[in-house]
Image (cartoon, grey):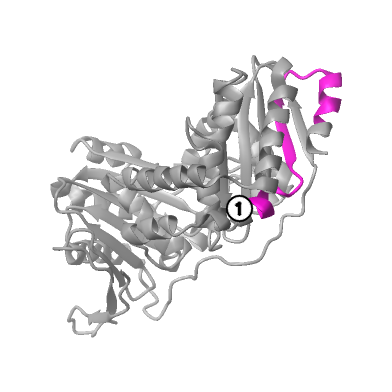
Amino acid sequence: MTSRGFKATARTSSEARAVARTQTLIKGENGIGTVRKTTLPGGLRIVTETLPSVRSATFGIWAHVGSRDETPSLNGATHYLEHLLFKGTSRRSALDISAAIDAVGGEMNAFTAKEYTCYYARVLDTDLPLAIDVVCDMLTGSLIREEDVDVERGAILEEIAMTEDDPGDCVHDLFAHTMLGDTPLGRPVLGTVDTVNALTADRIRRFYKKHYDPTHLVVACAGNIDHNKVVRQVRAAFEKADALKRPDATPIAPRDGRRTIRTAGRVELQGRKTEQAHVVLGMPGLSRSDERRWALGVLNTALGGGMSSRLFQEVREKRGLAYSVYSYTSGFADCGLFGVYAGCRPSQVHDVLKICRDELDHVAEHGLPDDEIARAIGQLRGSTVLGLEDTGALMNRIGKSELCWGDQMSVDDMLSRIAAVTPDDVRSVAREILGQRPSLSVIGPLKDRQASRLHEAVA
């Protein structure tokens, strides 16, 4: 359960520095699974989860910036910046950064999403101070030199080319554009060849300065760790970089808003010489803070979340029309998407779409039987726990929770919320979500007469 008690702590100094605030957010048993949070003067939040039974620790820093924070001309800047923070600081070269973590057998990486960015390192618990120093140095001391921007531009263009070579990946970007149009959420995280080529070191530096202020950051650490030690080491690293300059600053609040997706029956096609046609059929979903998301998660699992799901059974097992078929949800701060993906031979596109549309329509009108809902609840509860069995997953959970919700939920609470979903909850959300007219995105070698027929699938 969540506790709201504050404990004030301060380090003595001649200047009587501002007080850090520490909370215990989740009280674990015998210290296992305890989640604590300290907010430093300057607005930097540090969240930790203890797991004494392991010998590893994962340290990450989450930034409250993603591709939705970009203007059209800055599309790709967040991801570009993610690359550049690995290129060197005043204390370390790019080789020094990677060699430091490699020398202790650790792993280091980063990822950029539409609403946040994360940098992390996973190491032995004894090497955690090194990981903290390296990652904090990257986040606070990046040089973003002109020559590094020019070199990394080539690597990013290759990454875009690599993604373009995978139509099964590209079709999800196309679906986001189909549903959200030329908006920050509808544009690709990587940017385009044109926008990446147009980005300059000066523009990226300004973007870095604006979005990497401590008030926009959340430090998350999980594993065999001591919260107070992590706080001291992080504070020392940020103070060494003179990054906590405003002691009265407060953390930025989680995103909010009420964006409504008003798309119905839109069809976007990309002709390519591929062996398969890659299809996403979908409609608006729910935001990540919508209380109905638990019921939607159960519905999604029953429809296309595993080998026993309806779509897998109907499309693959009974008819062999696709190797990969599944459904998924994407929740943002103010809107969401629900989609069904399938990859199939171009000649089978219309059959696959008809089966998927028929299943969605049937579930929207008649709901799911109780036994399928019960199976989906069990599958979702199990996969939730199994997905949190390493320190990296725990770090992701507590870091994202603090950044996106400003709160923490224990695993037991999550399981309780899933178990509390009723058949009526699932049927209600099915009527609302699946009852909408869908939109369609397709990548593949479609002939003109096939393309014209695809509009019938969303009529």
**Residue 380 as seen in the image, left or right of residue 80:** left
**In the displayed structure, would residue 419 be above or below residue 11?**
above
Within 10 angstroms of label 1, few (less than 14), some, or many (20 or more) residues?
A: many
Q: Magenta segment range? A: 430-454
**Numbered marks: total:** 1
Residue 451 drawn above or below residue 387: above
Position of 83 with respect to 177 (left or right) is left
Residue 35 position in % (x across, y down): 27, 64
Tell me the element at label 1.
helix
Image point 62% across, 37% down: which residue? Answer: 340
- Visible in this render: residue 163? no
Residue at x 28% of width, y 49% of height: 134
x and y, in percent, of residue 237 in the image: 27, 61
Residue closer to the observer: 459 or 389 = 459
Going 71% across and 59% down the picture, which residue do you hit?
A: 260
Judge left or right: residue 345 versus residue 163: right
- Residue under numbered circle 1: 427
Estimate the x, y position of residue 191 in percent, counting from the top left: 62, 41
Is residue 451 part of the magenta span, yes or no? yes
Amino acid type assigned to the residue bearing label 1 in the image: Arg
